[in-house]
Amino acid sequence: MKLGYACINLSMKNTFRTLRLATLREQGLPYLQTLVDANMVLLAEILRWNHEHNVLMYRLSSDLVPFGSHDEVELTKIAFPLRHEIASLAQGMRLSTHPGQFTLPSADGEVWQRSVKDLHYHCYLMDILGIDGDIVLHGGGVYGDRGATAERIKRNLRSLPAEIQRRIRLENDERSWAVDELLPICEETGIPLIVDSLHHAINGKMPLANLPWVNIFATWQDRVPKLHYSEQDPTKRAGAHSSYVDVNAFSKFLASVPGSSYDVMLECKAKEQTLLKLRQELAILAREGSPEIATLINTKQIEGIYAAATL
């Protein structure tokens, strides 16, 4: 089992660079290229850090090319320095992207057309960097008619080019589309289903352990399933992620999901620091906890926990 984190690495001095649309229009492609250059350098640094710390799962930032899906940015005119090194670093690592809230498979008309353009951008980014990863989407809205919207989601997904469609994964959300509502769509379209634990806690109809895991994992066919794990920030709105996770709560999560042949993306504000801390705490529990907890953690085969505990 791999544990991963999303986008920002707090151990790095720099963050991915972006810009406002007005600046793009004023400075043009040469300035945008300088940002892409810097972002490629940072991405390579993060991937090297990941390998050094045995972190083999990571979500790419959608801002690697700022405004990459905008009509005014022609991707074929953008150079991608270090792309061969990045492709080499990506080997053995599970990478993904998570387009923003306005990329919606449930949308129609102009919104769907913009969503398609954004998906083309994310797919192009993966192709140019030599990455064959997951593109994660929420279902989007319901628009007053769940049945009709479900049919539109299926129709939209099937209309995508094969190179995009094979990378798409659907994830339950905290408002509109619960696991049991997305599962039939995934089964009919062949799109894998990601279960997000916090979203399910907010918008789920049964305990996590009672979900039809055999059917959920079957949507992945011969690929390793992926789950998302996070915890609620008690000071913020429902669905806001906490900075860190509680090792006992995470252990209960592991106990609720059968088997060990799946990966878990940690969606926490403290990013890689959360992952490192959790691995150390899991190793301590496996070594010093109750026999039941030790057996649970050991059978999940979590990569890096014992090496991490000695750092």
Image (cartoon, grey):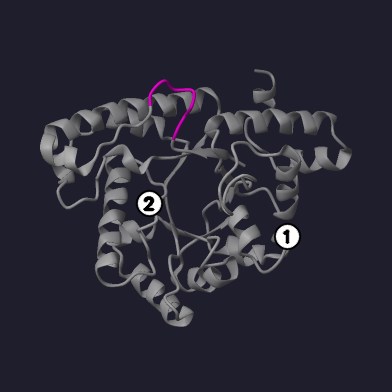
The residue that disc 1 covers is 209
Horizontal placement of 274 versus 282: left or right? left
Percent position (x, y) of residue 80? 23, 33
Determine crowd level at label 2: few under 14, some 14-19, many 20+ residues with C-alpha closer than 10 A. Answer: many
Horizontal placement of 138 versus 197: left or right? left
Taking the spot 18% from the left edge, 44% from the top edge, the residue there is 75
Q: Amino acid at mark 2?
A: Pro
Query: How many marks overall?
Result: 2
User: In the rendered structure, does residue 9 fall within the stretch colored magenta?
Assistant: yes
Principal secondary structure, stretch drawn in magenta: loop
Q: Is residue 288 above or below residue 210?
A: above
User: In the rendered structure, does residue 249 fall within the stretch colored magenta?
Assistant: no
Q: Secondary structure at mark 1?
A: helix
Residue 56 vs residue 71, the one in the foreground: 71
Instruction: Say which quadrant the C terminus sits in.
Output: top right
Taking the spot 58% from the left edge, 47% from the top edge, the residue there is 236
| Marks 1/2: CA–CA distance | 29 Å
Residue 293 vs residue 90, the one in the foreground: 293
Q: Secondary structure at mark 2?
A: loop
Q: Amino acid at mark 1?
A: Ala
Segment colored magenta:
8-14
Instruction: Say which quadrant the N terminus sits in.
Output: top right
Tell me which corner region of the image, top left, top right, bottom left or bottom right, holds residue 291: top right
Label drawn at residue 99: 2
Percent position (x, y) of residue 63? 32, 40
Taking the spot 31% from the left edge, 55% from the top edge, the residue there is 119
Residue 15 vs residue 275, the one in the foreground: 15
